[in-house]
Image (cartoon, helix red, strand yellow):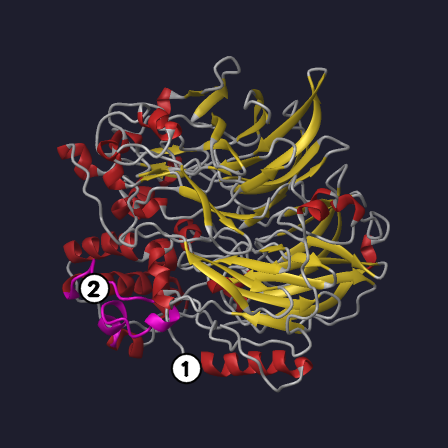
C-alpha cells in the first residue's frame, strides 16, 4: 500500500516516525510492535523520473560504475568487494557519522541496501521497503505490503527481510507471507503482485532477497522447520507471469515427478513417507545468476525433519538437500549439482552466500563458485560442471573429520552419533557460518568471512525412538529432536558443552590457510565488506562498527552504535565523496534459544531499534545515544504449580515459546522477556496466548496447540524462572 500526502518530503519522514512512535505506546505484545507506519511518497517521484533503471548490462559492467551498488552482492559475482579507495588504511581514522535514520522498528535488520543513482533502496522487518536519499537520509517513499502480523507464527525466525532487487525501473520485494511484489523505483507504486505459495496448509514464508536477471525475478522460500517442500520460482520481471519452478526435493512418488531431476532425487530417499513431513530443502537465502554459463545457482537448505533417521529411515543421500544446484536461467532445467552433506542430519544448510570468481587452481584457470555453508567446510567448485576443487575446514568440525576429495563426500565422525545419547556437536544448527555475508578480494585470492564456533546438543525425538513413529506437529517446529526437553538436557550435560566464540577471519580458499583471525566477545556477528582501500568492515553483536586492515586484521577504526549489527555494510560514492552504510538492529528468535552466553548485549541494556547509519570522511553528525533500560524483574505472582506441572510447562514453553522469547525464558532483549511481565500481563495471559489480543503485533493465538491448562503451566514455568532470577538480588539485599 502506498499513500500520497500533501506534506513536504522533508517533513513527511519525521511525521510518519512520530505517528508510529505514538501508536507504539498503545502496543504491548510479544513481537515487533512498531511497523504500522503510513506509507509515503515524495511528490517529485511520481513515476516520470526514470529511477532504478538497472539492467543486466549495467550489473555485468558494474566495474564501470564503482560508486554504485547495483545488486545484492554488488554485482552478479556477489563478491561484495568495492573498488573505492577514498576511505583507506590511512584516512579511515577520519571516518565519522554523516547521518542516521531511525527506522522505527525493533526487529532484526538483515537487508543489503541497493544504491543506484543517488538513492538507497532497502527493506526492513515485515517486508516494508524504503527509498531514501543516499546523501542526506531524507525519505523519498515507503511501500508497506501490509503483511498480516499474525503471520509471524508461520515464520521460523522473525519478520525479517534480507533485501530487495532493483531492476529495469522497478523494486522487487518478497514478503514474509509469500508474495512477490513489484513497485516503481520512482515512487513506490505497485506494478504487480503474485502469490508464490503452493500449499496454504503448510507454513511457508519468505525472508530472502529476490534476484533479478535475464528479464526474470528469482525467489525461494522458507519453512523447512515447519514441514514444507522447497522450491524456487522464476517470474517475468515485467508482468509477474511464472516462467518456471524447480522443486528441490521430491514429492509423493505416487503422483509422478515434475521433471527428471525429481525422479533422480526420489531414488535417494529410502523408506518412510517424507512427503507427508514436507522434506524441506528450502532455498531461503542464496540465489546467484551466472552470465558466463547462463546458470542460476540455488543454495538448498536442510531436511524436514532434521533427523535423517526419521525423514529417510532406509538411508540415502536425500537429494537435493544441502546442495548447490545449477539450473538453466531461462528454463529451470537442472545442469549439475554438488551436495555438501549427503543425508543431512544436523540442519547444515547450503543456503549461505555463494561467490563467483575467476581463479587459477592447480595451474589451470577456472571459473569457480565458492561457499562457506553451515557444516564448517569451505568449498571451491568448478561452475562449468560442478566438480569439487577444494574443501577446507574454516571452523571446528566434530561431526566430520574431512572431505574425501576423491568422492566429494564428508567423512563422518561415528563417535558423534546421537541416536542413543545426546551429543554436543560442532558446528550446531547456527552453523560455522550462517547467512551473514562474506567478501572476496579476487586480486589477493582472499575471503573475509564471519565465523562462529557454537555447538548444539543433538537428540532424536524420544517418541520416535520408542515407537518408530514420528508424529508431525502442525503449527510447531518439527525437528525430529527432543526440543521439548532441550533446556533440561543442556543443563544435565552443561559440563560437556564446548566453548562458544565468534571470529572475523581472512581465509585462503585454495590452501585453507587462516591468514588472520579477530575474535569477538559473542558469536552472532554481522556480514562483511572488503574494499580496495585495503579495509574490511564489519558490525558486531555488541554494537561496534569497525574497520580492519585487510592484510593483518588490525583494528583501525571503530564506532559504538549501541545496537547490534547483523546486516552487511556497503559503500558507495556520490560527487566524489565515498560513503559507508550499514543497517543496524539485532535479531532474536531461534538465536535466542542458544542464550546470551554471558555477553553484554546492547539490546539488554538499551532495547533494540532499527537504524540506518551512513559514514563519510570528516562526518560530523552526532549519534543519538539511547538511554539505559530498567531490566529488573518485578515480583511475580505466587507459584502454585506442582513439580510435574512445572516440568510440563517447561516442555511446552520450549516447543511453543522458546524460539522467540529465549531458552529458559531468558530473552536476549529483542523480544519481551516474559519473566518481566507485570501483574497486568499475568492477569490476561490466557487472552494473550489463546485469545490473540496482541495478534496485531505478531503475537498470534496458540489456541490450536495449547489448552487453557497447558497455557497456565507455561505461565507457571515463567513465574518459576522469574523467582529464580530474583534470588541473587534477594540474597544480596538480605531478602
Secondary structure mostly seen in the magenta stretch: loop
Whether residue 709 is in magenta: the answer is no
Residue on which disc 2 sits: 703
Vertically, is 721 above or below 369? Answer: below
Q: Is residue 709 visible?
A: yes
Magenta region, residue range: 684-708
**What number of labels is visible?**
2
Residue 9, percent across and down? Answer: 67, 80
Residue 526, percent across and down? Answer: 59, 50
Which is nearer the N-term, disc 1 or disc 2?
1
Residue in the image at 36% along x and 20% along y: 414
Residue in the image at 68% along x and 73% along y: 138
- Is 485 on the left-hand or right-hand side of 239? left
Q: What element carries label 1?
A: loop
Measured in 3D between alpha carbons, the distance from the residue under mark 1 to the one under mark 2, in whole angstroms, is 24 Å
Vertically, is 386 above or below 449? Answer: above
Along the viewing direction, whichever of 424 and 329 lies nearer the viewer: 329
Residue 112, percent across and down? Answer: 61, 54
Q: Is mark 2 on a helix, strand or loop?
A: loop
Outermost residue toward the top in this view = 406
Residue in the image at 70% along x and 52% along y: 69
Residue on which disc 1 sits: 26
Amino acid at each position: 500500500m502506498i499513500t500520497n500526502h500533501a506534506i513536504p518530503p522533508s517533513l513527511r519522514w519525521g511525521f510518519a516516525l512520530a505517528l508510529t512512535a505514538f501508536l507504539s505506546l498503545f502496543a504491548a505484545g510479544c513481537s515487533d510492535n512498531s511497523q504500522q507506519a503510513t506509507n509515503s511518497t515524495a511528490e517529485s517521484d511520481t513515476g516520470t523520473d526514470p529511477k532504478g533503471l538497472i539492467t543486466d548490462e549495467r550489473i555485468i559492467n558494474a566495474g564501470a560504475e564503482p560508486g554504485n551498488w547495483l545488486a545484492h552482492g554488488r554485482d552478479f559475482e556477489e563478491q561484495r568487494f568495492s573498488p573505492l579507495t577514498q576511505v583507506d588504511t590511512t584516512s579511515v581514522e577520519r571516518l565519522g557519522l554523516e547521518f542516521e535514520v531511525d527506522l522505527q522498528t525493533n526487529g532484526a535488520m538483515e537487508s543489503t541496501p541497493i544504491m543506484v543513482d543517488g538513492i538507497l533502496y532497502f527493506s526492513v522487518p515485515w517486508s516494508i521497503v524504503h527509498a531514501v536519499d543516499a546523501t542526506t537520509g531524507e525519505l523519498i517513499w515507503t511501500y508497506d505490503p501490509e503483511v498480516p502480523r499474525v503471520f509471524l507464527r508461520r515464520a521460523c525466525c522473525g519478520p525479517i527481510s534480507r533485501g530487495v532487487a532493483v531492476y529495469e525501473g522497478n523494486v522487487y520485494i518478497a514478503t514474509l507471507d509469500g508474495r512477490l511484489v513489484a513497485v516503481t523505483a520512482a515512487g513506490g507504486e505497485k506494478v504487480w503482485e503474485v502469490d508464490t505459495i503452493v500449499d496454504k496448509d503448510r507454513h511457508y514464508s519468505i525472508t530472502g532477497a529476490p534476484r533479478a536477471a535475464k528479464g526474470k525475478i528469482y525467489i525461494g522460500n522458507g519453512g523447512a522447520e515447519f514441514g514444507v517442500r522447497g522450491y524456487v520460482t522464476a517470474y517475468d520481471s515485467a508482468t509477474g507471469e511464472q516462467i518456471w519452478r524447480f522443486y528441490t526435493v521430491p514429492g509423493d512418488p505416487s503422483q509422478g515427478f515434475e521433471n527428471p531431476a525429481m525422479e533422480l532425487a526420489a531414488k535417494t530417499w529410502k523408506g518412510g513417507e517424507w512427503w507427508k513431513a514436507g522434506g524441506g530443502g528450502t532455498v531461503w537465502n542464496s540465489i546467484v545468476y551466472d552470465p558466463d554459463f547462463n546458470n542460476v545457482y540455488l543454495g538448498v537448505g536442510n531436511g524436514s525433519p532434521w533427523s535423517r533417521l526419521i525423514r529417510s529411515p532406509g538411508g540415502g543421500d536425500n537429494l537435493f538437500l544441502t546442495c548447490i544446484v545449477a539450473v538453466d536461467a531461462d528454463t529451470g532445467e537442472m545442469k549439475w549439482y554438488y551436495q555438501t552433506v549427503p543425508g543431512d542430519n544436523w540442519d547444515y544448510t547450503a543456503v549461505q552466500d555463494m561467490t563467483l570468481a575467476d581463479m587459477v587452481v592447480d595451474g589451470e584457470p577456472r571459473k569457480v563458485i565458492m561457499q562457506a555453508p553451515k557444516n564448517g567446510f569451505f568449498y571451491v567448485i568448478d561452475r562449468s560442471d560442478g566438480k569439487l576443487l577444494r574443501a577446507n575446514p574454516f571452523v571446528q568440525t566434530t561431526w566430520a573429520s574431512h572431505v574425501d576429495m576423491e568422492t566429494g563426500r564428508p567423512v563422518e565422525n561415528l563417535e558423534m552419533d546421537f541416536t542413543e545419547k545426546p551429543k554436543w556437536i560442532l558446528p550446531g544448527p547456527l552453523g560455522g557460518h550462517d547467512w551473514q555475508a562474506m567478501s572476496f578480494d579476487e586480486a589477493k585470492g582472499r575471503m573475509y568471512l564471519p565465523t562462529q564456533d557454537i555447538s548444539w546438543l543433538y537428540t532424536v525425538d524420544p517418541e520416535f525412538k520408542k515407537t518408530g513413529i514420528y508424529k508431525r506437529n502442525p503449527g510447531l517446529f518439527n525437528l525430529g529432536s527432543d526440543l521439548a526437553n532441550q533446556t533440561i538436557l543442556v543443563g544435565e550435560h552443561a559440563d560437556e558443552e564446548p566453548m562458544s566464540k565468534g571470529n572475523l577471519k581472512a581465509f585462503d580458499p585454495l590452501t585453507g590457510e587462516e591468514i588472520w583471525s579477530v575474535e569477538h566477545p559473542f558469536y552472532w556477528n554481522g556480514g562483511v565488506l572488503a574494499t580496495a582501500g585495503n579495509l574490511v568492515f564489519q558490525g558486531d553483536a555488541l554494537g561496534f562498527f569497525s574497520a580492519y586492515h585487510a592484510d593483518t586484521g588490525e583494528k583501525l577504526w571503530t564506532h559504538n552504535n549501541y545496537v547490534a549489527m547483523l546486516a552487511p555494510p556497503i559503500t558507495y560514492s556520490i560527487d566524489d565523496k565515498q560513503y559507508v552504510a550499514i543497517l543496524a538492529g539485532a535479531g532474536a528468535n531461534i538465536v535466542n534459544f542458544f542464550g546470551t552466553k554471558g555477553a553484554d548485549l546492547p539490546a539488554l541494556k538499551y532495547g533494540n531499534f532499527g537504524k540506518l547509519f551512513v559514514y563519510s570522511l570528516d562526518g560530523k553528525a552526532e549519534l543519538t545515544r539511547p538511554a539505559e533500560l530498567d531490566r529488573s524483574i518485578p515480583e511475580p505472582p505466587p507459584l502454585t504449580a506442582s513439580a510435574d506441572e512445572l516440568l510440563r510447562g517447561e516442555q511446552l514453553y520450549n516447543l511453543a515459546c522458546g524460539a522467540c522469547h529465549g531458552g529458559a525464558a531468558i530473552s536476549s532483549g529483542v523480544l519481551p522477556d516474559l519473566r518481566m511481565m507485570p501483574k497486568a500481563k499475568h492477569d490476561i495471559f490466557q487472552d494473550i496466548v489463546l485469545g490473540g489480543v496482541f495478534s496485531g503485533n505478531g503475537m498470534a493465538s496458540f489456541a490450536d496447540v495449547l489448552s487453557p491448562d497447558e497455557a497456565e503451566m507455561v505461565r507457571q514455568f515463567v513465574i518459576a524462572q522469574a523467582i529464580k532470577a530474583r534470588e541473587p538480588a534477594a540474597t544480596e539485599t538480605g531478602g
